[in-house]
Amino acid sequence: MSESVQSGGEIGAESDEPTVLIVDDEQPITDAYAQWLENDYEVRTAYSGSEALDELDDTVDVVLLDRRMPDLSGEDVLTEIHEQDLGCRVALVSAVEPDFDILELGFDAYLEKPVSEADELRETVETLLRRTTYDSQMQQFLSLATKKAALEAKKSREDLEANEEYAKLQSQLAELREHLSSTATGLDDEDLRAEFHEGR
């Protein structure tokens, strides 16, 4: 089992604060993220994909998940989250630039390493917590919009126009936008901006 860093310092103490699970095989990174977040959230840490599975349960609200780990990858952990039908929001955190393969992955935000600003991490967690209040269709729309923004920040217009999966993504977004037009007006401005640019 991994170490748990919990607000108030008592392991197992009940808390009304949202729970954030931080998963990264580089312990200094995991511990730094935990330190940035522990005053505002109940924080759990895992230093491998298998430890992450031990820490995952339906009380976890947000997972900050390293994409590349030696024993069990972040993508494997992501698959397990969906198979267990856990309701948490997931941010992939990776030194790997987003490529078209991210379109196959069910995550909600993509952060490129190094994440050197505590505010960037906090903003991501706050955004994902806010999204837990939206219905499943809205969450799907925002997840797709995040992928679109991540790809557009890294890929040329030519690469995007030549990719069939990207064209399919645009069609999905257009269809969802049509269905959500009546409720989208209630979205937070920051979430609406995600469709155009979530990365920094």
Image (cartoon, grey):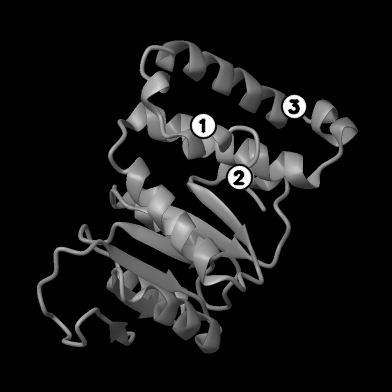
Distance between the alpha carbons at the discs numbered 1 and 2: 10 Å
Q: Where is residue 157 in the image (x, y as percent from the top left)?
A: 86, 32
Tell which circle, 1 or 3, labels the residue nearer the N-terminal end: 3
Residue 160: image x %, image y %?
A: 80, 32
**Residues tagged 1 and 3 counted as in contact (Cβ below 8 A):** no
96 versus 188 height, above or below: below
Quadrant of the snapshot with the N terminus: bottom left
- Place of residue 91 in the rendered image (x, y in percent of width and height, measured from the top left): 49, 56
Q: Given the image, on which type of amino acid does mark 3 rest?
A: Glu
* Residue that label 3 marks: 164
Q: Which residue is drawn at 33% across and 77% down?
A: 38
Q: Label for residue 40?
A: none
Foreground of the two, 49 or 117: 117
Give the residue type at disc 2: Glu
Q: What residue type is labelled 1?
A: Leu
Secondary structure beneath label 3 = helix
Q: Is residue 172 left or right of residue 30?
A: right
Q: Mark 2 points at which residue?
A: 198
Question: Along the horizontal axis of the image, is 40 left or right of 127?
Answer: left
The kind of secondary structure element at disc 1 is helix
Residue found 71% across the figure and 42% down from its top: 151
Which callout, 3 or 2, points to the residue nearer the camera? 2
The span from disc 3 to disc 2 (Cα, nearest Å) is: 22 Å
**Does 24 sit left or right of 11 as displayed?**
right
Residue 111, image quadrant: bottom right
- Quick one: label 2, few (<14), some, or many (20+) residues within 10 Å? many
